């Protein structure tokens, strides 16, 4: 491996080895916690990074110590020819972990090429097992499509299959039991994510999170939750298993137990900016210099600038109405 590029270490000595890549700002769903009801301004095609540019950024990031990437969006599977990008990323031997986050609507049609590319790990967003509630959260009657894609992925050997559930007070909090119960039958990892308020949705939507400690207490009535030892690539998920279950339950608690201290993430937005913290509007443009012919050394300096501007922590719990100009879909969650 070339060693002439500096490692991505921030001002608080955190090594940034995880790059989340928003492949597109476009999404086929309008999840209430993610997208404003009136929709969003879309980036023009020429504003988003080409696949060649994404691969170049990844190649450099890898030289600077990134060993984990996630493709997200918007909805990554709505971008044209996204299947051609995947094998270009799996060819970096330094990447120990490559995964994809999707809402699952178009997943069935892409599973063969995802598998062929070598990606084994998929996260699928699923907030309920009730088709009516699914439609009320996402704006689309698509539960059965997602459910069948999840089973097809399991049959094809994808492992682990993680189901991401954002829990909203009074909307899908009752569905948590049924979702957690899936882990008793299937080897799925069900992950409950605290709803993060922000500039993503209409203030009038009045959405509210449910603390994961409350969920854990509720779930404990349905079986003993046994802690799962942490693994290297776990990130902020705190993992449990119902005794004897094939699957797992995970809690991701950005509000009640923020994990800023150990945050190892940088985000590459769909329009080619590096964003060191989801909850800070500070970003640095990588695309313009790249298109003006910058060499890798210059791009590496921009990467370092992003790392050094990573704040020590977000202020979400103390300022719950934090307003961000970036939208979750463009940034990538
Ligand atoms: N379209 C893909 C999907 O639905 O999985 C990927 C993009 S989505 C922005 C990535 C993740 O962010 C999803 O798991 C989603 O549930 C989560 N997310 C979006 N808005 C959120 C919010 N306000 N609070 C917590 N998680 C959120």
Image: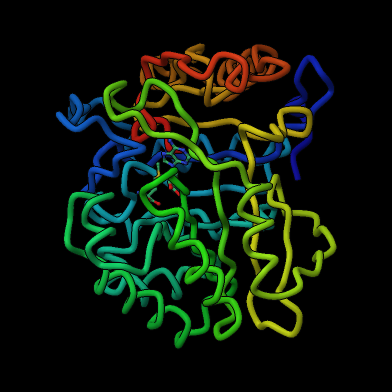
Is residue 284 in view? no
Residue sitting at x 62%, y 16%: 318
The image's colour scheme reads rainbow
Residue sitting at x 23%, y 48%: 29
Q: Is residue 121 left or right of residue 38?
A: right
- Vertical relation: 172 (above or below) 41: below
User: Where does the image place residue 92, in percent across and percent down from the top left?
Assistant: 61, 54
Q: Is residue 233 left or right of residue 75?
A: right
User: Where does the image place residue 235, in percent across and percent down from the top left?
Assistant: 71, 47
- Vertical relation: 313 (above or below) 143: above
Residue sitting at x 45%, y 85%: 156
Along the line of sight, the residue nearer the viewer: 87 or 36: 36
Ligand 1 in which quarter: top left
Along the line of sight, the residue nearer the viewer: 292 or 104: 104
Can you say which quadrant of the picture contains the N terminus?
top right
Residue sitting at x 48%, y 82%: 154
């Amino acid at each position: 491996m070339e060693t002439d590029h500096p490692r991505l270490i921030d001002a608080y000595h955190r090594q940034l080895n995880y790059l989340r890549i928003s492949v597109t700002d476009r999404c086929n769903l309008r999840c209430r916690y993610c997208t404003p009801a009136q929709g969003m301004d879309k980036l023009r095609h020429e504003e988003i990074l080409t696949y060649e540019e994404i691969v170049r950024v990844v190649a450099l990031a890898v030289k600077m110590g990134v060993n984990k990437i996630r493709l997200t969006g918007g909805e990554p599977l709505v971008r044209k020819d996204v299947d051609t990008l995947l094998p270009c990323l799996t060819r970096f031997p330094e990447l120990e972990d490559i995964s994809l986050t999707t809402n699952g609507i178009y997943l069935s049609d892409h599973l063969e090429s995802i598998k062929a590319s070598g990606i084994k790990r998929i996260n699928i967003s699923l907030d309920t097992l009730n088709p009516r509630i699914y439609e009320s959260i996402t704006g689309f009657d698509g539960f059965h499509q997602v459910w069948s894609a999840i089973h097809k992925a399991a049959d094809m050997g994808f492992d682990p299959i993680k189901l991401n559930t954002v829990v909203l007070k009074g909307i899908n909090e009752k569905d948590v039991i049924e979702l957690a119960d899936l882990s008793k039958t299937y080897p799925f990892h069900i992950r409950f994510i605290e709803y993060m308020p922000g500039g993503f949705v209409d203030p009038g939507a009045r959405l509210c999170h449910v603390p994961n400690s409350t969920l854990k207490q509720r779930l404990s009535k349905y079986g003993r939750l046994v802690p799962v030892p942490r693994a290297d690539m776990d990130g902020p998920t705190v993992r449990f298993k119902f005794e004897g279950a094939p699957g797992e339950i995970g809690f991701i608690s950005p509000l009640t137990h923020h994990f800023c201290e150990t945050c190892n993430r940088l985000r590459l937005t769909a329009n080619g900016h590096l964003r060191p913290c989801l909850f800070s509007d500070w970003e640095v443009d990588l695309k313009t210099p790249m298109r003006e012919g910058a060499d890798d050394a210059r791009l590496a300096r921009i990467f370092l600038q992003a790392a050094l501007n990573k704040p020590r922590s977000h202020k979400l719990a103390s300022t719950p109405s934090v307003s961000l100009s970036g939208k979750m879909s463009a940034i990538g969650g």
